[in-house]
Amino acid sequence: MTSMKDLTLVMMVGPLGAHPIERTMGFLLRVAARETLSRIIGTGRVTRAVLAAPDLEGLESLGHASFPLEIDLDPASQPFDFGSRLADLIARYRISRLLYVGAGASPLMTSEDWDAALEAFQEMEEGLLTNNLHSSDWIAVAPAEAVRARPHRLLTDNAMAWVLHREGGLPARAWPRSTASLLDLDTPVDALIVARHPLAPPALRAAVVETGWDDRRVARIEALLRTPGSRLILAGRVPSWAWAALERHAQIWTRVFSEERGMQASARMQRGEVRSLVYAYLQAVGPRAFFQILGELADGALLDIRVWMAAAGRWPEPADRYAADLFAWETIRDPLLREWVEAAAGAPLPVLLGGHTLVSAGLVALLESALGIPRLPL
């Protein structure tokens, strides 16, 4: 048996935001962060845990003797930069082996899941272990100094594994694929999906219920997944394994339009290089006709509209993006996004709008909830 190596857990949470939808989503992420921190620390495999946050709201219960955690407040004097902030934490806390976990990363992973992953990393002298090489939500890295060498390349945590492997030369291992390891709580529709899942942490499930957000569209898609012969459209950054899960475990017909996977990790979005065939068709026929045509093709649709946003060369504020996921089109300030969502709300079929998680791990989580099976083989 190998000797225990020092491993420092670092998690970051963002600001709650001023808009009510942003604050609610921010609060849910803090609930998820508390649950995940507890599960990881409970494995006994981390020697130190650091939570970087802009403030302590919703985090007051952390940091006492029974929950060993150091809270490091973001500097108020400078704008937040992910790569620089993480590099600074690594330097100040003298971190040699790092486990970075996003606030919304893998909320369905159990303590046993984390224990198995960290045991595997314990056996690695050098390299990285991540849930997703192309878009990491959590990543274990040794040596952590590799992060400090290129903070300017780490615009978001999603790029970490790809950059450290391809540019930093670290050997990379992806943790065995599962809904629990891959699902990232990033948007309101992700939260609605997680809350209905058998493995959802009770505190997070209760917090989602307290929002009052309407989950009837989610329930209708779950019913569709249980109905043999139903037709479902998937569009956006759809991975082959998620589509394959439907083929194996659901007796439905699918139309899949998979495009622009890795648009953030590769920085194509930042360079304005995102192109979308589905968005081009939406532009050609207009939103209302687009959703009417979807109704002729399928009984339901899951749409990663972040690809459309990037292809349109615009990235609305979080409040608008979250409102889109909740079909609160009247509150959306961006006129183009408001037009899309209003048309989707009037579509003749149930539609879910969201981001990458919706058409990847979120899709399989929907299937697991629909079938009452906590963990389908992928």
Image (spheres, rainbow, N blue to C red):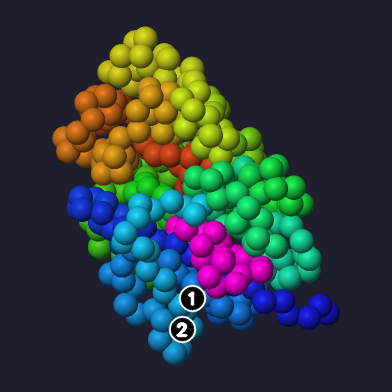
Q: Nearer the viewer, residue 262 or 299?
A: 262
Q: Residue at x 66, y 56 (%)?
A: 146
Measuring from the top left, give residue 257's x and y in whole percent: 53, 24
Label 1 Cα crowd, 10 Å radius (few <14 / some 14-19 / many 20+):
some
Label 2 Cα crowd, 10 Å radius (few <14 / some 14-19 / many 20+):
some
Query: In the visual, does 261 lie left or right of 166?
Result: left
Q: Is residue 324 above or below residue 28?
A: above
Q: Nearer the viewer, residue 15 or 258?
A: 15
Q: Residue at x 74, y 66 (%)?
A: 120
Callout 2 secondary element: loop
Residue 199, can we see it? Answer: no
Query: In the visual, does 265 lie left or right of 4?
Result: left
Measuring from the top left, give residue 91's x and y in whole percent: 56, 66
Residue position marked by numbered label 2 in the rendering: 67
Residue position marked by numbered label 1 in the rendering: 38
Q: Which residues are magenta?
A: 85-106
Measuring from the top left, give residue 325's x and y in whole percent: 32, 41
| Labelled pair 2, 1 in contact (Cβ < 8 Å) | yes
Query: How far is the residue under mark 2 from the one under mark 1?
Result: 8 Å
Q: Nearer the viewer, residue 63 or 186?
A: 63
Q: Is residue 97 magenta?
A: yes
The amino acid type, in three-letter code, at marker 1 is Ser
The amino acid type, in three-letter code, at marker 2 is Phe
Sequence-earlier tag: 2 or 1: 1
Q: What mark, if any, has residue 71 been given in the picture? A: none
| Quadrant (top left, top right, bottom left, bottom right) of the N terminus | bottom right
